[in-house]
Image (cartoon, helix red, strand yellow):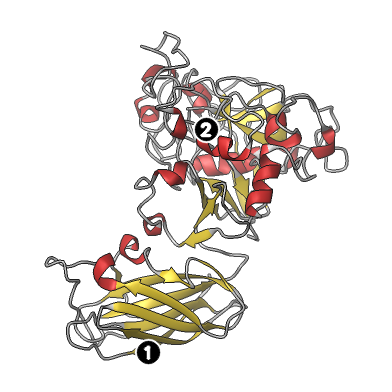
Amino acid sequence: MKMKKLAVAAITATASSVALAETSQTPMISVPEVENVKMVQAANRLVTITYELTQDAVVTLDIQTNANTSAAADDPGWTSIGGEAVSVAVGDVWKKCSGKTTYTITWQADQAWPGKDGNGFKIAANGARARVTAWPLDNTPDYMVVDISAGAKPNTQRYYPAVEFLPGGLFGRDEYRTTQIVMRKIMAKNVTWTMGSTSDETWRSTSGSEDTHRVMLTNNYYIGVFEVTQTQWSLIQSKREWPSNFKNIEYRAKRPVEKVSYNEIRNNSGDDNVANPDYDWPIAPNENSFLGLLRSRTGIDFDLPSETQWEFAARAGNGYAKWGDGSRIMNVNEDRNLDRLGRHVYNGGKINGTGEPGSECTAENGTAEVGSYDKNSWGLYDMHGNVYEWCLDWYETDIKDNYGKVNINPDAPSQTLSGASGTKRVKRGGTWWTDSSKARPAYRTSSEPTLRDKGEGFRLACTAGLQ
């Protein structure tokens, strides 16, 4: 476990201002450090923090308080005022910082952190502090927000240490499900775990495709907090701008994109839908595919998750016969635990469980707006139900010998790791028209990579420099 090193510099509060002290927080093992932290506050309560870095880093900020003004810098009594108030800080923060001698952050304390009288909390001298954290570029913060609007520039993603720090809150701004993509860091490197399901899991497949086997991922990664939405697709792929079946203009913006094939997501230009092995993983996506265009706009190595990455994220640290929030898998049909977590056939997918919803239906039937249900234990939404999610791999029933590797032969990408010819791609997570058995974390199925169906969508994964 990496240890933390704290540097403290106290200042004296002036009248009618918020009294602050500064700290910096950096891991000690070959990582950047924050130095020479200074903080001043103007009469208008604008707080200015300056600092130096020993090397390039992603920088985040927290503001903390402690009623005990004589507390030591590492006193556990220090408490964050809350990410929402801190998130409005601007300048050299929430991003990669490089190329300067001195970096500057400003924070309008009275506007971001108002007191009961509306004038800002009044804190005793040294009763609050700013904590500046430097994150190494191969171990960046837990949340990454990527702008994909038409005016987006590559490599301008923002980073936040927790979901509470996202400006406006995850559901306070529609942009997080339309013009921006929110990614969650998954710490998976060298973690050995068991993939599949045991015989006592309700309605498990008897084909052998879910047989348990030990796997290990070799890299940490980011994965989408939400499935890719119709708006996000439309901003990137103009050749099939709004392909989805559920196209009601009033509701489509935050619904997941569907009727998109594996081929057009990764291998093809979007106006065709034929096999194109020249772009099979591990080769980079076709530059005119959705992923190719997204990479060009953002500068980030976006791709589909492997099915091992997908299942690890869907389980979210929970074991056999569990949904991703740790609740028990109970029933093939109307599972009340799944009802909380995602759209399926019996909780609105079909009308009264049987009626086929029309393409102009509201989000009460068919697909739901992403994020309409509860998150899993790692803060991911709709891992169960809503739409099936394409994964990178070729499908095979028996993958026990792969040990978690992507089931594509890197030397012959048209083949599986076993040498068989690849014919179908993996899809995971169930969809709005399937029952709960298909939404289980262990459930595996597949389709031809040309399939464009109203039950298939996807979520994004990337490393973005993580190791």
Q: From mark 2 to mark 1, how far is it between C-alphas?
A: 49 Å
| Residue lying at 45% horizontally and 28% vertically, measured from the top left | 252
Q: Is residue 445 above or below residue 32?
A: above
Residue drawn 77% across and 41% down? Answer: 281
Where is residue 151? Give x, y as percent: 56, 51
Q: Residue at x 22, y 86 (%)?
A: 125
Between residues 51 and 199, which one lies in front from this camera angle?
51
Q: Quadrant of the C terminus?
A: bottom right
Q: Compare residues 263 and 420 and report the one nearer the observer.
A: 263
Instruction: Label 2: state its secondary structure.
Output: helix
Residue found at x 37% / y 38%: 374
Tag of residue 239: none
Location of residue 156 (image quadrant): bottom right
Q: Which residue is mark 1?
A: 9
Q: Which mark is residue 230?
A: 2
Secondary structure found at label 1: strand
Label 1: how many Cα within 10 Å (few below 14, some 14–19, many 20+):
some
Rendered location of residue 203, percent (x, y): 51, 21
Image: 361 above or below 317: above
* Residue 94 place in picture, x, y as percent: 48, 66
For residue 100, what is the image quadrant?
Answer: bottom right
Q: What's under tag 1, amino acid-wise?
A: Ala
